[in-house]
């Protein structure tokens, strides 16, 4: 994996904290002993990233008005 650094302004950082604290955005424990569940992990992470990006677009749009 490549190392990645993200730098956010304070309002965006707080928005990300809010996003991550919502129950629907909780990342489940990795299923070490369940191969079927492991196969779903990449899709779950992609869905999480998609929802996070949309959440941030909405928040930035509201602040830009």
Image (cartoon, grey):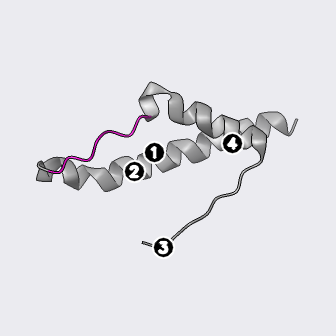
The first of marks 2 and 3 along the sequence is 3
**Viewed as shown, does residue 52 lie left or right of 35?**
right
Q: CA distance from mark 2 to mark 3?
A: 16 Å
Residue 58 locus on image (x, y percent):
69, 37
Circle 4: element type:
helix
Q: Which of the pair 21/41 is nearer the observer?
A: 21
Q: How many marks?
A: 4
SS label for mark 3: loop
The answer to which of 31 and 55 lies nearer the viewer is 31
Tag 4 near tag 1, CB within 8 Å: no
Q: Compute the Cα span from label 4 to label 1.
A: 17 Å
Alpha-carbon span between mark 1 and mark 3: 19 Å
Instruction: Tell whether label 4 touches label 2 (CB within 8 Å).
Output: no
- Report the disc number at residue 2: 3
Residue 60 visible here = no
Magenta segment's dominant SS is loop
List the residue tagged with mark 1. Answer: 48
> Residue 28, position in %: x, y?
32, 39
Query: What range of the chain is rendered magenta?
Result: 26-32
Which badge, 1 or 3, comes first in the chain's sequence?
3
Q: CA distance from mark 2 to mark 4?
A: 20 Å
Q: Residues within 10 Å of mark 4 (few under 14, many from 20)?
A: few
Dot in front, 2 or 4: 4
Q: CA distance from mark 2 to mark 1?
A: 5 Å
Asked if labels 3 and 2 touch by Cβ distance under 8 angstroms, the answer is no
| Mark 2 touches mark 1? (CB < 8 Å) | yes
Name the residue carrying label 2: 45
Q: Which residue is mark 4?
A: 13
Q: CA distance from mark 3 to mark 4?
A: 22 Å
Q: How busy is the neighbourhood of tag 3: few (under 14 within 10 Å), some, or many (20 plus)?
A: few
């Amino acid at each position: 994996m490549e190392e990645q650094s993200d730098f956010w302004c304070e309002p965006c950082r707080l928005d990300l904290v809010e996003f991550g604290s919502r129950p629907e955005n909780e990342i489940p424990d990795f299923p070490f002993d369940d191969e079927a569940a492991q196969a779903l992990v990449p899709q779950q992470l992609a869905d999480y990233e998609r929802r996070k990006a949309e959440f941030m677009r909405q928040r930035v749009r509201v602040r830009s008005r």
